[in-house]
Image (tube, rainbow, N blue to C red):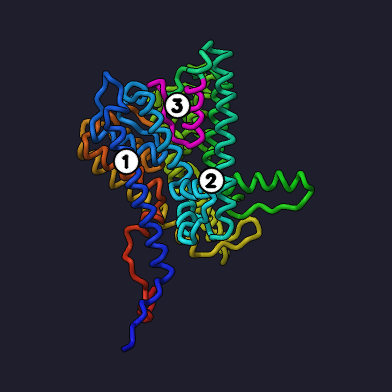
């Protein structure tokens, strides 16, 4: 009697399975975080955290967003804050990547399936070299955390006369918050107390940029420095070039526009330097962090719209940030420029970019825009007393996993908070990953194509 062998799983099916496993593991991690943050062992004795708020904070922490309807400092004790930092750290590096790190520490072999999961989680184009990428990424992240925790601790002790122990915890929390682009704080008013401390702001901005550029870019920079030291030639990948240039070009354009729109506030009311740093810090932070040095209501509606667009664009792929990603915007702009020039191929840095990649960029941007609009409409219907621009700002902040807020999240109804939390999860997964998760698990075997008509 002949036994029929099971058909091999197609490439698309494997990809769907990997993406769904990642999404499921992320959801389980958020639920575990919710249970812990709802527990009395993590909350302050004088405060009660509701289940929906615990879920919201857990989702916000794991997705590296930073939006919160409650005060982290007042609502959670030290253990609760440590739980939040663990969620933040795992979310920044990636759950599958963290699993691989543990395997490396105990000298356990990483399976092919795990390598594929990490490949999908980190949005890499090839599986080879994944272990090396993990080692380099974790080393860069931890090295920056340790170094800047020491620097900021010394800064707090020298300039603010804080004790070493309190300064160490304060510094580690906010360094991690900036580097992972999550934007949580222990002050209750973000970094408003440091609005005139430009050196402290410089530390934080550098860490935000470091986290927002993405691991592949940072690893390429590291390899370039090693090559220069050894007097060897080195070529940056097309991904790194586009990510790096787009990240800074978008930020500079946003900064210039805000200077123009809020000229009077920045240069007259704030006497120049303070106002310029207000604009600069908020623009850098809007890329996906969310830490602020002033009440964002101080800016005009035009500047708030610009910050919203920056949050929507977000950071680079395979970074600690969210949004539709800088590479998406770069590919769209390159395509439009080539279309206007009547060129056949889309080119950048002497390389031709596949049209399939361009198509995915337009799809990501379109789906991201639709999600933001639909979510805004739903929340506006549930909170009719809140200004529309404020709701759109909050929704964009959630989608971009940024965490900037105009202070309205705490007043949202439970359903609105759930919508925001779901947006944060999609922002963490990425548009294309989220679409694959919810797509049908079936290979396209249809070989019949319909006649084409213009």
1 or 3: tag closer to the N-terminus: 1
Residue 381: horizontal and vertical position, in percent? 20, 40
Above or below: residue 50 compared with residue 113 = above
- The residue that mark 3 highlights is 292
Furthest toward the top, the residue is: 161
Residue at 65%, 45% in the rendered image? 221
Where is mark 1, residue-wise? 32
The span picked out in magenta is: 168-189
Q: Is residue 171 magenta?
A: yes
Image quadrant holding the N terminus, namely bottom left
- Crowd band around label 1 with a 10 angstrom C-alpha radius: few (<14), some (14–19), many (20+): some
How many angstroms separate mark 1 from mark 3 (CA)? 29 Å
Q: Secondary structure at mark 1?
A: helix
Q: Nearer the viewer, mark 2 or mark 1?
A: 2
* Residue 450 sits in quarter: bottom left
Q: Where residue 277 sits: x, y (%)?
A: 53, 24
- Residue at image position (38%, 62%) is 16
Question: What's the mark number on residue 105?
Answer: 2
Badge nearest the viewer, 3 or 2: 2
CB atoms of marks 3 and 2 within 8 Å = no
Q: Residue drawn 33% across and 21% down? A: 74
Image position of 378 (left or right of 215): left
State the residue lying farthest toward the bottom. 1
Position in image of residue 262 (x %, y %): 47, 26
For the residues labelled 2 and 1, the Cα–Cα distance comes to 24 Å
Q: Earlier in the sequence, mark 2 or mark 1?
A: 1
Q: On screen, 262 above or below 399?
A: above
Residue 316, above or below 360: above
Please tell me how crowded label 2 is: few (under 14), some (14-19), or many (20+) other residues with Cα within 10 Å.
few
């Amino acid at each position: 009697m002949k036994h029929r062998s099971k058909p091999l799983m197609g490439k698309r099916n494997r990809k769907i399975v990997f993406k769904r496993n990642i999404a499921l593991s992320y959801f389980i991690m958020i639920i575990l975080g919710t249970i812990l943050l709802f527990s009395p062992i993590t909350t302050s004795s004088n405060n009660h955290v509701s289940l929906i708020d615990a879920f919201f904070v857990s989702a916000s922490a794991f997705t590296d967003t930073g939006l919160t309807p409650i005060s982290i400092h007042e609502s959670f004790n030290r253990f609760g804050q440590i739980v939040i930092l663990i969620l933040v750290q795992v979310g920044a590096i990636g759950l599958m990547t963290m699993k691989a790190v543990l395997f490396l520490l105990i000298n356990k072999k990483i399976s092919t399936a795990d390598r594929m999961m990490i490949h999908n989680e980190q949005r890499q184009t090839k599986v080879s070299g994944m272990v090396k990428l993990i080692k380099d990424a974790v080393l860069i992240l931890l090295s920056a955390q340790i170094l800047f925790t020491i620097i900021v601790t010394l800064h707090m002790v020298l300039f603010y006369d804080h004790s070493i122990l309190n300064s160490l915890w304060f510094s580690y929390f906010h360094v991690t918050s900036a580097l992972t682009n999550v934007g949580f704080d222990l002050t209750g008013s973000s970094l408003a107390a440091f609005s005139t401390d430009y050196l402290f702001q410089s530390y934080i901005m550098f860490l935000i940029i470091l986290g927002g550029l993405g691991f592949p870019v940072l690893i390429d920079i590291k390899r370039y420095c090693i090559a220069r030291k050894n007097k060897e030639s080195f070529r940056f990948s097309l991904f790194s070039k586009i990510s790096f240039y787009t990240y800074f070009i978008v930020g500079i354009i946003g900064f210039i526009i805000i200077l123009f729109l809020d000229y009077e506030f920045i240069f007259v009311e704030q006497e120049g330097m303070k106002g310029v740093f207000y604009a600069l810090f908020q623009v850098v932070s809007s890329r996906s962090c969310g830490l602020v040095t002033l009440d964002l209501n101080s800016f005009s509606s035009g500047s708030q719209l610009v910050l919203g667009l920056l949050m929507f664009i977000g950071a680079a792929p395979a970074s600690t940030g969210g949004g539709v990603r800088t590479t998406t915007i770069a590919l769209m702009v390159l395509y439009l420029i080539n279309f206007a020039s009547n060129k056949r191929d889309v080119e950048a840095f002497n390389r031709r970019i596949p049209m399939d990649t361009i198509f995915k960029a337009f799809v990501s941007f379109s789906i991201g825009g639709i999600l933001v609009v639909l979510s805004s409409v739903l929340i506006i219907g549930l909170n009719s007393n809140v200004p529309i621009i404020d709701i759109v700002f909050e929704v964009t902040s959630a989608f971009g996993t940024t965490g900037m807020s105009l202070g309205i999240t705490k007043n949202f109804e439970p359903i609105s908070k759930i919508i925001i939390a779901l947006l944060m999860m999609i922002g963490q997964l990425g548009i294309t990953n989220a679409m694959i998760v919810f797509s049908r698990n079936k290979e396209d075997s249809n070989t019949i194509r319909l006649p084409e008509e213009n």
